[in-house]
């Protein structure tokens, strides 16, 4: 993977590179370089299979990370292309013309993270949720427990404990333990 | 179950703060009133929400027969449970062994019906996401009185594994009149057979009046359903 | 010369046939279940379902024809039964048969389907509509070889009265049409498969495609009527086949046995095959069954 | 064959121009409450005559928000719920999640645990394929196959039960290894089960695959052009049915698959019949693989690595993707950790995600209504993988 990274480096201004496994690496790319990089990987390097496209919410530094994971079957290697987006009204250009299935992933991201992909087909239709009136649920600042408490009736009698404390009480009543 | 319902009805109206909506949902355009041109060229006005559904609410159907006949009917109902073939959740996967050689529920008069009109038992097989709850309500209301609901799996009782999920209901009998719960995640076919057997006992004893319970507390059920289903785009009673 | 005693006699026939049909259909389901290594429904299940459906408290109508659909269907079944001699030579059970009842039987075989189509169409359910269009096209193509076979038999025995046809087949198994005119019987039995709503010709009801076709919207009492007909219609149809091709039945035991065997034929085929698409089944009838019928007529 | 000339023209934005009021088209919802649908999803069909003009897949009826729920559970708390994502074959969730966590936490699992994991995965594959065969035959109206295969599946579930204690949700493969060793005499009982399954498969082969009517229905239905395989991210039997020997077990061997000898099963016709046949032969291959695993597995050795105190288990920042070949295709977990005791992001990549959405919507056009169910089953779509 290092060799791949080196000759990619000559072509594109790539940021940090992570060799996760011998057959899996992640590179970070600036937004305007994403499309040429994907095209290069697909056509020149043989990464023809878009495995997944998903997002990670780094709310501390106010960014979304988009991850395009590509797979090259013939030489059995994967590369994940990372891309950082500003978090407020995030928007990204669609790649559904490179891989038709990307449209599905983009619909999900639009709904679950609120990341907009203009000109991606059917991107504004309901995908998973129906009649969702709250903020996109996969964002970190959406508290699912609070939401379900406020929305759904709960049957009385259900209690939850912090497992660490509970097991400590159970296992080490004298208050010791390896915690 | 019944008095449990009444207890809860007493503490209505629910004082929980309704979460503010961040966006409002437009009515789907196939539900908007419109004029269409029929193939033979005449113009007709259509208001789907008015024209496509029957607006009459459910009414309490008291058994109008003598006790003997009602008992006979109850016995027959117990002996022929027609399940609506609607796998709402992962519990549906244990329904398949139930219908096949090892367990063979047909022996007990349990059969599948693919259409709600002919089914008289709605098995909520597992957690209900809001989207499915909407369909389940429609399916239930299309069934004919008397009809029974069996909640299958812990997640129908109190949320089970998904107690903190934002998309699944936690307490099924707030939204549909449940006659019986079968616990487990997921319940084994033996548990299902036992559950159906208990349901038969209930029906024979004349306790399977869920449809009437639904009709009596109709407003309460509807209020609960509408609190959860944010885009309520069907009439209150859609058969 | 019509005798009023006919009426209670025919009703008695009807009663026997209904119960026999109820038990027989359940038995056939059990046999099918055995192929799946199951025990299947209890033999009394049909009665439970019938009582239950009559006992449902609410029912929804979609209009007059919606009511009449099951009624027509039931009329088709009962009419077919009553105008065909059930037991040959028996004063009690030869029913209202008369010269030329063959034509009437042909008509009644089709009658129920038409009524059903009208009724189900009014329910307005798309699955019903699709099922009807499939059903009518398939039944029509399945009726064709049967009609040809019937004409062949009528030509062969020079009569349109079923009792006379049965009479002509008496006196030994070798006199049955089955052996005197095998092509007609072959054509008729193929069309019999098509008319029994079992695989490979059950695309009309096809649960995985259009659950469950025409009866989708039918429930409670309507459904109960149709169940009653489901018990009568096959028996009545089989009675016709039995009389025309298998030498009729002179006593009830023979009747029960022959009906059971003919029914079993369709069940055996049914459990072993997937279902044809509708255009495939129509093509199948036109390619295989109709030529047999033509041959039968030519041979006579 | 409906008249092609009546088919709707495409508008500028690529969508079809369909005037429902013209009476030429009929909108038909297949599902969610429909026996011919796989799982709880729905296809919005627009039909002209008997042929589908346009089909849109609608999912989300089974959405529980796993990826959100896992963000507020510790790593060990996640382990019991991941298997709930996919009912017919839960073990792949457990494996992929466990493998991802181990990779990021730098845990090396004992050798025997790797063998037992492979064994569990193959058993799960057999279950899933048996379900599929029944569904495929049932979609064409041959109900008896479902009876036989479900019975065979019950036998395999018994093996699962004595190994893991559960029928469906096993919760057996946990981070650090597997929960327990094989019980006494497991090999012999497994051998009996495998023989039962093989005999069932012979019956299925005679009744289903040699059946003229089944061939009439299945041959030529849902042809997948091999050129589409990479474009649409097609994996698993659908790809192998199209002649592309795409099998993660061979391409990027995980667990012990590099020590087992097998060849990916492929067919060239790329229609429903070919896919069904690929799955049948793949099932037989799994039976053979289980025999290999049981014979070559190390007899002794522990099955669980020593974990840190799972209640205070923090995993340093990192991200990885772990994949496996499940019965429907490539199953993968994309796991991101941020140094805390909770996963930062988990993304489940189910094969149905591409099969049931983009591919199905493309294949379903011009298909007869009767064949829609058969087509969906032949893609072996399973909605919870799409919506989680």
Image: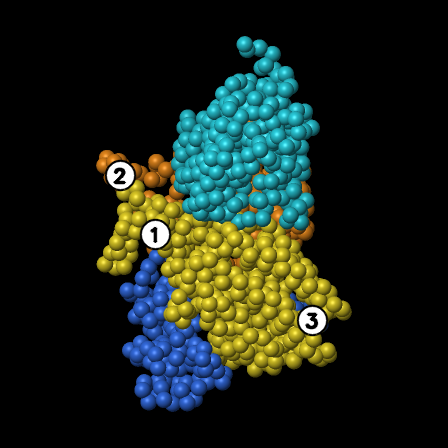
Chain colours: A blue, B orange, C cyan, D yellow
**Residue wearing tag 2:** B39
Label 2 to label 1, Cα distance in Å?
A: 19 Å
**Circles 2, 1 touching at the beta carbon (< 8 Å):** no
Q: Of A3 and A138, which appears nearest the observer?
A: A3
Q: At 63% across and 16% down in the image, what residue appears?
A: C91
Q: Secondary structure at mark 3?
A: loop
Q: Residues within 10 Å of mark 2 (few under 14, many from 20)?
A: few
Q: Is residue A37 visible?
A: no
Label 3 to label 1, Cα distance in Å?
A: 53 Å
B40 relative position to B229: left or right: left
Q: At 63% across and 64% down in the image, what residue appears?
A: D170
Q: Secondary structure at mark 2?
A: loop
Closer to the eye: label 3 or 1: 1
State the image coordinates of residue A15 (x, y, percent, origin top left): 36, 85
Q: At 46% across and 72% down in the image, what residue appears?
A: D244
State the image coordinates of residue D167 (x, y, percent, origin top left): 65, 59
**Residue wearing tag 3:** D180
State the image coordinates of residue D294 (x, y, percent, origin top left): 69, 73
Q: Is residue D149 above or below residue B225?
A: below
Q: Earlier in the sequence, mark 3 or mark 1?
A: 1
Same chain, marks 2 and 1? Answer: no
Same chain, marks 2 and 3? Answer: no
Q: Residues within 10 Å of mark 1 (few under 14, many from 20)?
A: many
Q: Residue furthest right?
A: D184
Label 2 to label 3, Cα distance in Å?
A: 69 Å
**Residue wearing tag 1:** D53
């Amino acid at each position: 993977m290092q060799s791949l990274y080196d000759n990619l480096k000559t072509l594109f201004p790539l940021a940090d590179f992570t060799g996760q496994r011998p057959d899996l690496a992640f590179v970070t790319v600036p937004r305007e370089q994403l499309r040429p990089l994907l095209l290069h990987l697909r056509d020149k390097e043989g990464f023809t299979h878009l495995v997944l496209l998903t997002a990670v919410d780094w709310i501390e530094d106010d960014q979304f990370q988009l991850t395009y994971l590509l797979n090259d079957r013939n030489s059995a290697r994967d590369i994940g292309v990372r891309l950082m987006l500003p978090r407020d009204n995030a928007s990204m250009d669609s790649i559904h013309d490179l891989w038709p299935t990307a449209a599905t992933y983009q619909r999900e991201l639009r709904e679950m993270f609120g990341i907009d992909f203009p000109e991606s087909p059917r991107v504004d239709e309901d995908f998973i949720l129906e009649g969702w009136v709250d903020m996109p649920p996969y964002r970190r600042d959406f508290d699912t427990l609070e939401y379900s408490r406020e929305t759904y009736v709960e049957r009385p009698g259900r209690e939850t404990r912090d497992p660490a404390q509970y097991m400590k009480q159970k296992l080490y009543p004298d208050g010791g333990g390896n915690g | 179950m019944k008095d449990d319902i009444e207890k809860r009805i007493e503490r209505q109206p629910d004082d929980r703060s309704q979460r503010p909506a961040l966006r409002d949902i437009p009515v789907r355009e196939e539900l908007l009133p419109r004029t269409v041109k029929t193939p033979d060229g005449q113009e007709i006005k259509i208001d789907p929400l008015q024209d496509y559904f029957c607006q009459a609410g459910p009414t309490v159907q008291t058994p109008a027969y003598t006790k003997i006949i009602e008992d006979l009917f109850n016995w027959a109902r117990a002996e022929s449970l027609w399940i609506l073939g609607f796998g709402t959740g992962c519990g549906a996967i244990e329904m398949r062994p139930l219908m096949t050689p090892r367990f063979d529920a047909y022996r007990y008069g349990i059969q599948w019906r693919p259409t709600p009109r002919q089914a008289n038992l709605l098995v909520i097989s597992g957690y209900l996401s809001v989207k499915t709850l909407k369909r389940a309500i429609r399916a239930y209301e299309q069934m004919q009185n008397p009809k029974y609901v069996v909640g299958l799996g812990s997640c129908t009782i109190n949320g089970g594994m998904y107690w903190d999920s934002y998309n699944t209901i936690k307490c099924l009998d707030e939204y549909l009149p449940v006659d019986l719960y079968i616990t487990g995640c997921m319940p084994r076919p033996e548990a299902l057979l036992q559950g159906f057997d208990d349901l038969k006992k209930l029906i024979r004893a004349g306790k399977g009046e869920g449809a009437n319970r639904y009709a009596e507390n109709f407003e309460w059920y509807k209020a609960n359903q509408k609190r959860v289903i944010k885009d309520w785009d069907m009439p209150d009673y859609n058969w | 010369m019509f005798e009023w005693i006919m009426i209670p006699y025919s009703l008695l026939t009807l009663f026997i046939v209904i119960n026999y049909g109820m038990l027989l259909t359940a038995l056939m389901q059990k046999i099918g279940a055995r192929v799946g290594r199951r025990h299947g429904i209890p033999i009394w299940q049909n009665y439970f379902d019938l009582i239950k459906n009559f006992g449902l408290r609410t029912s929804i109508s979609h209009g007059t024809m919606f009511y009449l659909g099951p009624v027509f269907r039931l009329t088709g079944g009962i009419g077919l039964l009553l105008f065909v001699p059930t037991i040959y030579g028996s004063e009690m059970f030869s029913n209202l048969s008369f010269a030329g009842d063959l034509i009437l039987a042909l008509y009644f075989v089709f009658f129920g389907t038409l009524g059903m189509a009208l009724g189900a169409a009014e329910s307005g359910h798309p699955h019903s509509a699709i099922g009807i269009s499939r059903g009518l096209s398939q039944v029509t193509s399945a009726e064709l070889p049967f009609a040809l076979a019937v004409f062949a038999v009528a030509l062969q025995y020079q009569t349109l009265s079923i009792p006379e046809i049965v009479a002509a087949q008496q006196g030994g198994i070798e006199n049955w049409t089955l052996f005197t005119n095998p092509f007609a019987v072959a054509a008729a039995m193929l069309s019999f498969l098509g008319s029994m709503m079992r695989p490979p010709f059950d695309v009309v009801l096809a649960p995985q495609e259009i659950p469950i076709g025409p009866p989708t919207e039918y429930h409670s009492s309507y459904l109960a009527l149709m169940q009653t007909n489901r018990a009568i219609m096959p028996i009545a149809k089989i009675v016709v086949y039995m009389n025309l091709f298998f030498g009729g039945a002179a006593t009830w035991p023979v009747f029960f046995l022959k009906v059971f065997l003919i029914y079993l034929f369709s069940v055996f085929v049914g459990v072993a095959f997937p279902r044809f698409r509708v255009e495939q089944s129509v093509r199948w009838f036109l390619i295989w069954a109709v030529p047999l019928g033509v041959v039968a007529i030519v041979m006579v | 064959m409906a008249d092609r000339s009546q088919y709707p023209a495409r508008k500028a934005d690529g969508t079809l121009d369909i005037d429902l009021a013209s009476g030429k088209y009929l909108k038909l919802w297949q599902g969610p409450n429909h026996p011919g649908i796989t799982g709880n999803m729905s296809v919005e069909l627009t039909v002209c005559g008997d042929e589908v003009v346009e089909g849109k897949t609608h999912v989300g009826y089974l959405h529980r928000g796993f990826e959100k729920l896992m963000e507020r559970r510790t790593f060990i708390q996640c382990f019991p719920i991941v298997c709930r994502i996919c009912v017919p074959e839960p073990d792949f969730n457990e494996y992929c999640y466990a493998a991802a966590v181990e990779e990021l936490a730098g845990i090396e699992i004992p050798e025997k645990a790797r063998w037992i994991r492979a064994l569990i995965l193959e058993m799960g594959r057999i279950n899933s394929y048996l379900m599929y065969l029944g569904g495929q035959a049932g979609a064409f109206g041959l109900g008896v196959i479902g009876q036989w295969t479900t019975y065979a599946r019950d036998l395999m579930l018994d093996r699962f039960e004595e190994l893991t204690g559960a029928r469906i949700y096993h919760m057996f493969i946990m981070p650090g290894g597997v929960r327990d060793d094989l019980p006494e005499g497991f090999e012999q009982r497994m051998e009996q089960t495998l023989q039962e399954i093989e005999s069932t498969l012979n019956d299925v082969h005679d009744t289903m695959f040699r059946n003229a009517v089944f061939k009439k229905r299945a041959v030529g239905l849902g042809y997948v052009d091999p050129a589409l395989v990479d474009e649409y991210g097609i994996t698993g039997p659908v790809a192998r049915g199209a002649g592309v020997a795409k099998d993660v077990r061979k391409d990027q061997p995980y667990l012990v698959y590099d020590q087992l000898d097998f060849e990916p099963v492929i067919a060239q016709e790329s229609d429903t019949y070919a896919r069904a046949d690929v799955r049948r032969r793949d099932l037989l291959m799994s039976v053979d693989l289980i025999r290999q695993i049981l014979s070559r597995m190390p007899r002794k050795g522990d099955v669980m690595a020593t974990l840190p105190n799972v209640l205070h288990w923090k995993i340093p920042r990192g991200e990885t993707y772990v994949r496996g070949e499940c019965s429907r295709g490539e199953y993968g977990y994309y796991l991101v950790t941020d140094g805390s005791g909770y996963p930062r992001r988990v993304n489940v990549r189910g094969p149905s995600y591409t099969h049931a959405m983009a591919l199905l919507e493309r294949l379903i056009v011009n298909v007869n209504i009767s064949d829609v169910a058969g087509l969906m089953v032949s893609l072996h779509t399973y909605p919870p993988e799409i919506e989680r």
